[in-house]
């Protein structure tokens, strides 16, 4: 969308765009360097972006490195994903006070805050759409998610340099933001000057463009942007095997490979926490001794924990093999049955942040190979 | 914002927010098992379909899924039959008459009674598994269907709903068989696991539906006996149990293969379950 009516934005123009979003009463959340990683935190403007930095990623490894240039978005995705804002790690659901046999129940206030998410990648737009299907578009809708989602502004960025762990193109997306954004940027150099090709994806985005009135992009800017995306597409770090992964995994539920993975997997839950689509949660009731109130909170949960499948005094998924299988089969297979798409967007976070470097693409490849020659090497 | 569903004028009720209901009465069924009668504060009727469950909150303790085991005699309230096994179920069973509790639901897909009522239904229940089946049994008998009930309990003192069993036994179109795992000399009925009763059941495998609820291991044996008796997979329905936190498809806990047991179940056809029940620790 918007290829024809693209605009050209200078670095100063981007700053003006961010300030215009702030002026709308939005809190800006974007990539920034914190604790040795690029995290999504509150930012004030482009000075907070990881300008001139990149991230080197591999199975179980992540490292920031100075770039030779001063690119603003010359990095990819870190351990945070946008789900921490839309579907937060912990939130209160309600509190209740019981007095003389009467219960007063107060639902937690819905968020009124308006966020602008800056630097959202194509894989992350896909992940947000996937969480929409889970939390908004089923028979029930999560009102907190809805409130955040309806107020959000998405400023996307096309990826120029995928990490070694990226495989979005094999999951049907990336590296270019195609839909689901308000505005999208491609970072380009024109005559050695850093600037952005700006595409519009919504009425809210168009209104902002009208307000800032940047010049239209010429053919040179457009082809520079297309070249960035093309280069990124050609340098994808990994790929998912081209197989019917759903059928492959559902046919492999009692494959010995699960036990082999379990010998490495620590069931640490990292992969589920960094995954931008993992949505599982649990609830906790606590008693506030001071106010005498009962508080029910929701927090992220992980299918790698023993309590997750706890029933009748034991865990249904007692071993790590069955928990890893649940995670991977849900993500890549049963997600199709439940929500009509894969649950994986190819962002590679689970590969990078797995302390033992388990690589989901490599595991699928092993199942695909094993399907032809069962138990080979197992 | 782009592509999110349109905002609705009337905010739909938060599916995670319980409503306050009251314990109108309770009775001890067997040791450690209580039936609770629950009514809405405003007195408006609470509805459900046989086989559905609710999420019940004991304030200050927690929330658990519990099947609806019937309607109150006046038809406005719901009955739950609960075994006190842990913190929340013990707190629910320990509530005093008149106490408030939290209710969400009813949720899920119940027994296929539209199909079943006019025909013959074979019910196999183990232990507390009779609770979610009681409303189905009542519905089948009320609709003039033919009922075979095979019920197994640990021992004679563990038999749930003896008055209902006696009433069903005397229904014209019903065959009711009760067995216990262990019994002393005072017991004159069947002894042994419930699945051994299947060959005694009089049903036409081409028209009967089987509704099964009990411990998972018992359901597995029940299914193989039913299949031996000639019932096809598509005519066998099981009520599944899994860990549940939300009951509305958000929390992920209840997944069993592609199914969210809270939403697609708890009652699922065996034709859909067969390939999954084969897999350990799924
Ligand atoms: C769809 C559905 C319908 C249901 N219908 C009914 C019904 O009609 N009636 C009914 O009684 N139940 C029903 N249940 C089961 C009921 O939900 C559970 O019994 C309940 O959730 C237990 O919660 P609790 O807090 O009381 O016990 P929990 O604390 O969950 O404990 C359960 C058991 O495990 C033991 N235990 C606790 N913690 C641990 C641990 N960490 N490790 C090992 N063992 C432990 C306890 O001692 C106890 O024996 C249903 C469940 C589902 C999913
Ligand atoms: S796969 Fe890796 S990240 Fe995921 S639980 Fe196992 S050890 Fe942790
Ligand atoms: S109980 Fe939460 S998804 Fe089913």
Image (tube, rainbow, N blue to C red):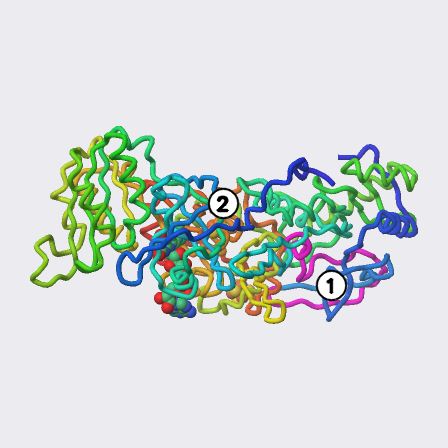
Q: Is mark 1 within 8 Å of ligand 2?
A: no
Q: From the viewer's perspective, is A279 left or right of A118?
A: left
Which quadrant does the C terminus of chain A fall into? bottom left
Q: Circle 1 marks a residue in which chain? A: A
Q: Residue A340 appears at what percent x and percent y?
A: 53, 40
The residue located at (24%, 35%) in the rendering is B141
Badge 2 crowding class, 10 Å Cα cut-off, few under 14, some 14 to 19, many 20 or more, is few
User: Is-magenta flag for residue A67?
Assistant: yes
Q: Which mark is residue A245?
A: none
The residue located at (80%, 54%) in the rendering is A27
Q: Is residue A253 visible?
A: no
Q: Which residues are magenta?
A: A59-87
* B89 vs A217: above or below: below
Q: Which residue is mark 1?
A: A38
Marks 2 and 1, the one that precedes in the sequence? 1
Mark 2 or 1: the one toward you: 1
Q: Circle 2 marks a residue in which chain? A: A
Q: CA distance from mark 2 to mark 1?
A: 33 Å
Q: Residue B163 appears at what percent x and percent y?
A: 21, 48
Q: Same chain for marks 2 and 1?
A: yes
Which quadrant does the N terminus of chain A fall into? top right
């Amino acid at each position: 969308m918007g290829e024809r009516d693209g605009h050209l934005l200078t670095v100063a123009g981007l700053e003006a765009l961010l300030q215009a979003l702030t002026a709308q009463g939005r809190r800006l959340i974007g990539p920034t360097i914190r604790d040795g990683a690029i995290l999504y935190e509150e930012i004030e403007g482009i000075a907070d972006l990881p300008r001139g930095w990149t991230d080197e990623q591999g199975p179980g490894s992540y490292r920031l490195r100075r770039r030779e240039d001063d690119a603003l978005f010359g990095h990819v995705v870190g351990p945070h994903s946008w789900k921490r804002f839309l579907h937060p790690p912990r939130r209160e659901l309600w509190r209740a006070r019981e007095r003389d046999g009467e219960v007063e129940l107060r639902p937690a206030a819905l968020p009124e805050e308006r966020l602008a998410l800056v630097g959202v990648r194509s894989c992350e737009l896909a992940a947000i759409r996937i969480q929409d299907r889970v939390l908004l578009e089923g028979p029930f809708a999560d009102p907190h998610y809805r409130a955040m989602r309806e107020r959000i502004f998405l400023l996307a960025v096309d990826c120029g340099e995928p990490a070694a762990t990226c495989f979005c193109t094999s999951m049907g997306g990336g590296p270019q933001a195609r839909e689901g954004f308000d505005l999208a940027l491609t970072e380009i150099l024109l005559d050695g000057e850093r600037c952005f090709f700006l595409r519009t994806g919504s009425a809210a985005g168009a209104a902002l463009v009208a307000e800032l009135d940047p010049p239209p992009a010429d053919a040179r800017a457009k082809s520079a942007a297309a070249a960035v995306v093309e280069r990124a597409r050609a340098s994808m770090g990994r790929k998912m095997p081209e197989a019917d992964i759903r059928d492959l995994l559902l046919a492999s539920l009692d494959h010995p490979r699960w036990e082999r993975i379990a010998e490495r997997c620590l069931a640490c839950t990292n992969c589920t926490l960094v995954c931008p689509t993992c949505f599982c949660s649990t609830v906790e009731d606590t008693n506030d001794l001071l106010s005498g109130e009962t508080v029910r909170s929701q927090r992220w949960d992980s299918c790698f924990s023993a309590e997750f499948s706890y029933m009748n005094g034991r865990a249904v998924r007692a071993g790590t093999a069955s928990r890893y299988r649940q995670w991977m089969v849900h993500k890549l297979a049963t997600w199709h049955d439940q929500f009509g798409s894969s649950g994986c967007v190819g962002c590679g976070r689970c590969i990078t942040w797995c302390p033992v470097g388990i690589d989901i693409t490599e595991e699928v490849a092993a199942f695909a190979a094993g399907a032809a020659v069962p138990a080979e090497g197992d | 914002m782009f592509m999110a569903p349109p905002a609705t004028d009337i905010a739909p009720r938060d599916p995670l927010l319980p409503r306050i209901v009251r314990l109108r009465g309770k009775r001890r069924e067997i040791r450690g098992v209580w039936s609770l009668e629950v009514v809405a504060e405003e007195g408006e009727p609470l509805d459900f379909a046989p086989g559905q469950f609710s999420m019940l909150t004991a304030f200050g303790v927690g929330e658990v899924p519990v099947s609806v085991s019937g309607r109150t005699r006046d038809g406005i309230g719901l009955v739950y039959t609960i075994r006190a096994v842990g913190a929340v179920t013990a707190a629910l069973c320990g509530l005093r008459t008149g106490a408030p509790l939290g209710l969400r639901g009813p949720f899920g897909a119940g027994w296929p009674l539209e199909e079943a009522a006019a025909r013959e239904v074979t019910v196999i229940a183990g232990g507390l598994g009779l609770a979610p089946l009681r409303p189905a049994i009542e519905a089948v008998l009320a609709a003039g269907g033919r009922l075979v009930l095979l019920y197994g309990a640990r021992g004679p003192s563990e038999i749930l709903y003896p008055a209902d069993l006696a009433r069903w036994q005397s229904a014209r179109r019903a065959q009711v068989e009760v067995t216990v795992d262990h019994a002393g000399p005072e017991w004159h009925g069947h002894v042994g696991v419930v699945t051994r009763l299947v060959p005694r059941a009089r049903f036409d495998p081409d028209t009967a539906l089987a509704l099964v609820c009990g411990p998972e291991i018992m359901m597995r044996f029940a299914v193989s006996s039913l299949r031996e008796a000639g019932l096809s997979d598509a005519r066998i329905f099981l009520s599944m149990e899994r860990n549940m936190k939300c009951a509305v498809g958000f929390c992920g806990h209840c997944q069993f293969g592609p199914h969210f047991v809270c939403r697609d179940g708890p009652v699922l056809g065996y034709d859909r379950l067969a390939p999954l029940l084969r897999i350990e620790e799924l």
